[in-house]
Amino acid sequence: MSGQRHDGAPLARDTVYVGAGRDSALSARSVNPPIVRASTFLFNSLQELDAASKAPFDGAFYGRLGTPTTFAFERAMAQVEGGYRSIATASGLSAIVAVLFAFLKTGDHVLIVDSVYDPVRRFCNRVLLGMGVECTFYDAGLGAEALEKLVRPTTRLVYMESPGSGTFEVQDIAAIVAMAKRHKLVTAMDNTWATPIFFRPIEHGVDISIHAATKYIVGHSDAVLGVITTNEATWPAVRQASQDLGACAGSEECNLGLRGLRTLAVRMRQHEATALALARWLVEQPGVSRVFHPALETSAGHDYWKRDFEGSSGLFSVEFGGMSAAAFDAFACALKLFSIGFSWGGFESLILPVHPEKTRTATPWQGAGPVLRFHAGLEAPADLIADLEAAFAAVKTPAHA
Ligand SMILES: *Cc1c(COP(=O)(O)O)cnc(C)c1O
């Protein structure tokens, strides 16, 4: 499938999502490429083995370096992210770790946004510090000038996540990228929240885009999968580090990632509409002190979201100012359509308490009450709002008032 219509016009994005990675040479006549599960590929001669070993990432060589199924997912991701190439990994976290290992060695320094996905902070504190790599966490709202003051001669990498985990601060990517380029720093961004439907970091000058494909790309809460997309300059280092870490993605998971891409555009439009309906309704409720949703004007970095993003996804948080722990628990338990659980990005609505006050180190969290993260699933918005209404009523009963 070429990237053009018969009349030469470029294909619309939705069409690109349906065709990306569907190489007919790989798939015979089935709609989807076959799932190739393989550790071993066979070579007809030592000459053929020798030739393949010179380009082990460009064709079937050894299962850990990729199968036709993982290559199809990687090609599709590179295409929809607008990157040079992509690498599928065992999980979102392993994708992040591969990028950190690709550029950091003993004596180096890395700048990491303070609202980073918490396991990344733990990796920095437990592994990178022990290796003699220094990590500075910076406030997501820091301007590029203030961020520049944190750059040291040993700084190698600026690691962004925008919007941030739990509290959804959006960063000024353009200004940070311009600053990083002046200092020849590599830039990487966790793009899991937006998906390439709503934001493509590489088009904004970021060197590397990372996804927990576990979330929206797989989209059905049934697989753990990561993917890194790089520009041409950073590809060799990231590919090498991923190979050395050995945390490759399985063919079945990559197939689920490919399957998720086919419906990503329609799912994201529904997640967006439902989350906005919930967020706008929640803002009006007594007991809600703040709603952290990048598309709301009151949310941190909203202007950058408006400037850079093409939409908003289904994940946002709500602060319940002054709510007691017992009432918070009663509210969460009263919800029937929102289950309590980790991860997000599937078809189902979820809630999870988040604790920015326990993790932030650059700037102490100024909170007025407990914070609950919501994932808006694909249920009817009116049903979800009725469920929330009932939960608010439950905490107003005398036992919790
Ligand atoms: C879940 C998540 C990850 C980690 O993904 P796993 O596949 O669970 O390892 C990374 N970044 C963000 C923003 C996430 O939400």
Image (cartoon, rainbow, N blue to C red):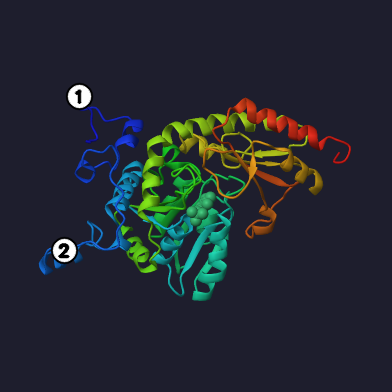
Picture quarter containing residue 174?
top left
Residue, disc 1? 7
Across and down, in percent, residue 399 comes to: 88, 41
Q: Which mark is nearer the camera, 1 or 2? A: 2
Residue visible at 32% across and 44% down? 76
Residue 120 falls left or right of residue 358: left
Q: Is residue 232 above or below residue 315?
A: below
Q: Is residue 348 above or below residue 209?
A: above
- Number of labels in the image equals 2
Residue 125 falls left or right of residue 264: right
| Residue 208 visible in image | no
Question: What is the number of the mark on residue 43?
Answer: 2
Amino acid of disc 1: Asp
Give the alpha-carbon distance from disc 1 to disc 2, as whole Å: 42 Å
Q: Is mark 1 within 8 Å of ligand 1?
A: no
Amino acid of disc 2: Phe
SS assignment at label 2: loop
